[in-house]
Image (cartoon, rainbow, N blue to C red):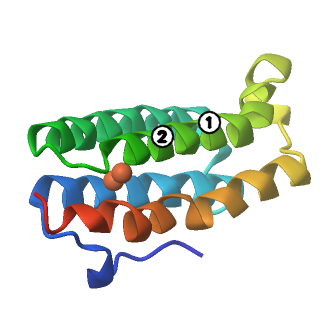
Amino acid sequence: MPIVWRDAFSIGYRQIDDDHRHLLDLINIVEGVLTGEYALGRLFDAIDDLATYTRQHFALEERLMMAAMYPGIDRHKAAHRELIEQLQKAAKPIRELKAAEPLSTLTIPEEARDALVGLLRHWLVDHIIKEDMQLKSVL
Ligand SMILES: [Fe+2]
Ligand SMILES: [Fe+2]
């Protein structure tokens, strides 16, 4: 089930909210590929797009927090690092398939698929609600 944007996710800062919406789209594409809704041919690009855009987004937030002298910046940056590690860890078994098999015969092991889909269900949304929301009064 795709994650649908809700007003409750808005921190009221346009650039960040736009990024979050885009990241949810990218998450939904990865999930859609893994659950068979979209063609498997998009798999590796979809994961790479999500990883790349996530890094860009975190860098933007960290620049804004720095400029605003946000006191919780260290904790927030640590949370970003943790999220990147979680994504890398869950995506690794799937990325490794790229070298192993041609796409035409590729099947994704259920365990690897469930781990990544399961992570992505709450991965960004929890962070938005818990950490990014605290930037609402700062930015
Ligand atoms: Fe964010
Ligand atoms: Fe953040």
Q: Is residue 25 above or below residue 72?
A: below
Q: Earlier in the sequence, mark 2 or mark 1?
A: 2
Residue 14 is drawn in which quadrant? bottom left
Tell me the quarter of the picture where residue 94 sits: top right
Residue under numbered circle 2? 78
- Residue at 57% over, 51% down: 30
Q: Is residue 122 above or below residue 89?
A: below
Q: CA distance from mark 2 to mark 1?
A: 11 Å
**The disc labelled 1 sits on which kind of residue?**
Glu
The residue located at (78%, 54%) in the rendering is 115
Residue at image coords 21%, 55%: 16
Residue sitting at x 14%, y 43%: 69
* Mark sitting on residue 85: 1
Is residue 52 in view?
yes
Residue furthest toward the front? Answer: 71
- Cβ atoms at labels 2 and 1 below 8 Å apart: no
What is the tally of numbered marks visible in this picture? 2
Near mark 2 (Cα within 10 A), the count class, few <14, some 14-19 or many ≥20, is few
Asked where in the image residue 120 lies, by quadrant, the reply is bottom right
Rendered location of residue 121, percent (x, y): 60, 66
Q: Is residue 22 visible?
A: no
Q: Is residue 79 left or right of residue 5?
A: right
Which quarter of the image is occupied by the C terminus?
bottom left
Left or right position of 8 against 49: left
Q: Give the vertical position of 78 relative to 71 (above or below).
A: above
In the rendered structure, find residue 31 and report the number of the disc placed on it.
none
* Nearest to the observer: residue 98 or residue 88: 88
- The response on whether ligand 2 sits within 8 Å of label 2 is no
Say few, some or many: other residues with alpha carbon within 10 Å of mark 1 (under 14 / 14 to 19 / 20 or more): few
